[in-house]
Image (tube, rainbow, N blue to C red):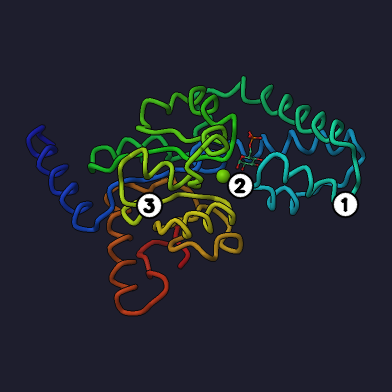
Amino acid sequence: MRRSDSRSAAARSTRAARSLGIRAALFDVDGVLADTARLHTAAWRRLADEEGLPFDDRLADQLRGVSREESLRRILNGRQVSDSDFRAMTDRKNAYYQEFVARLTGEDALPGARVLLEDLADEGITCAAVSISRNARQVLAQLELSPLLKVIIDGNDAAQSRTGLDRYLLAAAALRCDPRKCVVFEDSTAGISMARRAGMVTIGLGDPRRLAAADLIFDSLRGVSGRLLLRWLETLRNGESHGASKASCPSAKITV
Ligand code: G6P
Ligand code: MG
């Protein structure tokens, strides 16, 4: 494609994005951009084994998008510990997790993540990362994804927010973007419901049983281009205007 052709294609796509109203894409980090959900799991499993606490894959899945402290409460499952032991355990889990994070490289971005971020920029859509994790900035730096993100909201920002806004609304405010013009990519039940409450379009990544509340569900970001995304969102909008709760999308990758 000649440069002028690619410029006019980009201009057409930007117009398409504007006509759909989508201006920003907000990406969760763990399990969406970064292959780190398995590292959180490995760190919790190590702690649980040391403490003689039961831990299985089902519990691990239920901890996606759940804060460090709430995760430990669920693992303790009613076992009483002192505040200082509780704190020592969350610190120990975090130390294990940070050991794993220190070894991450650009190769650990999830398939399709980098390409989609680059593609969306070409489509005129601003990208941000939004995470509950206090380690998210470090993870994005290790994966060399930070330069592709206009705004990064992590667990520290949300905790320190004086506005009381949740992390998605904080990101929309930082981007000066109407929340209804944001599309959110999330792999957790908790994240999808928070993004919905913020009035955003939601795309779940992974197991449909976990993500039933999302507007669209993809297996992963692999093969998702900016242009396809806009087409699916258009289908969603048309479906909604006819009273359907979910779009029917032209891809086997998608559950609706
Ligand atoms: C993400 C992960 C959770 C993790 C939480 C807090 O949402 O999905 O598994 O517990 O972040 O992460 P942190 O790095 O602050 O312990
Ligand atoms: Mg996640």
State which tag comes first along the sequence, 1 or 3.
Answer: 1
Residue 85's spot in the image, x, y percent?
Answer: 87, 32
- In the figure, 16 relative to 150: above or below? below
Mark 1 nearby-residue class (10 Å; few <14, some 14–19, many ≥20): few
How much space separates mark 2 and mark 3, taking CA atoms?
A: 18 Å
Residue 78 relative to residue 116: left or right? right
Q: 162 or 245, which is in the foreground?
A: 162
- Dot 3 amino acid type: Val
Which secondary structure lies at badge 1?
loop
Query: Disc 2, disc 3: CB below 8 Å?
Result: no
State which tag comes first along the sequence, 2 or 3.
Answer: 2
Q: 162 or 46, which is in the foreground?
A: 162
Which secondary structure lies at badge 2?
loop
Residue 124's spot in the image, x, y percent?
Answer: 23, 42
Indicate yes or no: mark 1 CB to ligand 1 under 8 Å.
Answer: no
Q: Which residue is mark 2?
A: 65
Residue 140's spot in the image, x, y percent?
Answer: 49, 28
Q: Which residue is mark 1?
A: 78
- Dot 1 amino acid type: Gly
Extreme front residue here?
162
Q: Quadrant of residue 5?
A: top left
Q: Quadrant of residue 46?
A: top right
Task: Using the image, tell me which numbered label, if any, was put on residue 183.
Answer: 3
- In the figure, 34 relative to 144: above or below? below
Q: 87 or 20, which is in the foreground?
A: 87
Residue 252 relative to residue 3: left or right? right
- Dot 2 amino acid type: Gly
Picture residue at 73% right of the left edge, 44% below the top: 71
